[in-house]
Amino acid sequence: MSLITVNPQIPQADLEALATERGVSKAELEAVSLALDGLSSKEISQKLGISAIAVRKRLGEVYQKFEISGSGPGKLAELRRILTSGYLTANSTIALPRRKDWGEAPDVSVFYGRTEELATLEQWLIKDKCRLVALLGMPGIGKTTLSVKLAKQVQDEFDHLIWRSLSNAPSLQDFLADLIQFLSNQQEATIPKDVNEVISQLVNYLREHRCLLILDDVEVILRDGDRFGRYQQGYEGYGLLLRRVGEAEHKSCLLLNSQEKLREITLLESPKQPIRALPLAGLKPEDARKILQEKGLTGERQWQDLIDYSQGNPLALK
Ligand SMILES: Nc1ncnc2c1ncn2[C@@H]1O[C@H](COP(=O)(O)OP(=O)(O)OP(=O)(O)O)[C@@H](O)[C@H]1O
Ligand SMILES: [Mg+2]
């Protein structure tokens, strides 16, 4: 299933530690260790003195605990890949090469204000280890700009970073394939067709490495003006992606920008949960003034009128 060629024998103690982290029982570990050694279900059943059905049941439990779905021999290969990667990460003395793909993220060298928002978001991403964060607000209010500024500030806290816009409305399958290829360093040979399976594959990467995924222009895949934040036809799978990324145990963060509310975020967000939403208001008057200053506009009176009129919306000020 994967192209990883390094396949060191994982010492039993490490295998045990990695399996226990996922809640694998002693009996299940016994069966899966033999399967990883290359024994068939029949051979395992003879060795352990249990029925072949019991062996398959134990292995099935292990796959479930590692969130490996699907059918066929691919599952054992995927398990081996996850374990090998976990073992190598835990035992590596060499720093992991960080990968960053900023896609078409805009330049944010000119940036004013938003100190409180940046502090809140940093707290959510770094201290609270939030898994799903949404920046919400009207067109031009500064979501894209703020998300890039934030990502630049926190990038060293993450192993990998990827910035993508949904402005071309990619299908979920294409979008996930792009993410997985990036996260696997182009090593993943097969991307499952089934949406649930491919999301599981993504979640496994989000668990192995601390990744920051930034998703811009998410309103493109939502129905126009739908107050329930429902998806355009054919894009409903994105809702499943958000739910799974928000609810599954992992150490990464999906940060998204949207003009419209998203139903999953509305349903799941809570100060006690690692799922949050930040509604963005206009810039403070003193920061809005700096934009006008930069534009070469003079006259305190006119400034105030413009700022009142635009309610601090940076795009309107420009
Ligand atoms: N804090 C800021 N400092 C300086 N300029 C800003 C700031 N925030 C936004 N801008 C400027 O305002 C314009 C609109 O901002 P941005 O594109 O981030 O808005 P947006 O909320 O992502 O809009 P949309 O919903 O249309 O994607 C950009 O030209 C950007 O450079
Ligand atoms: Mg934007």
Image (spheres, grey):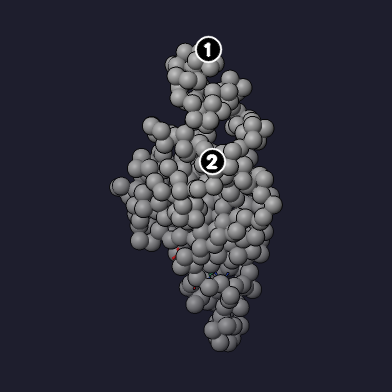
Residue 100 location, quadrant: bottom right
180 lies above or below 33: below
Secondary structure state at the residue bearing disc 2: helix
Disc nearer the start of the sequence (1/2): 1
Residue 111 location, quadrant: bottom right
Residue 162 shows up from this direction: yes
Q: Circle 2 is placed at which residue position?
A: 82
Q: At 46% from the left edge and 43% from the top edge, which residue is drawn? A: 201
Is 215 on the left-hand or right-hand side of 92? left
Secondary structure state at the residue bearing disc 1: loop
As drawn, the label of residue 49 is 1
Mark 2 surroundings within 10 Å by alpha-carbon count, few (fewer than 14), some (14 through 19), many (20 or more): many
Residue 87 locus on image (x, y percent): 62, 42
Q: At 49% from the left edge and 61% from the top edge, which residue is drawn? A: 163
Cβ of mark 1 under 8 A from ligand 2 = no
In the foreground, 226 or 172: 172
Q: At 45% from the left edge and 24% from the top edge, which residue is drawn? A: 40
Residue 23 locus on image (x, y percent): 60, 28
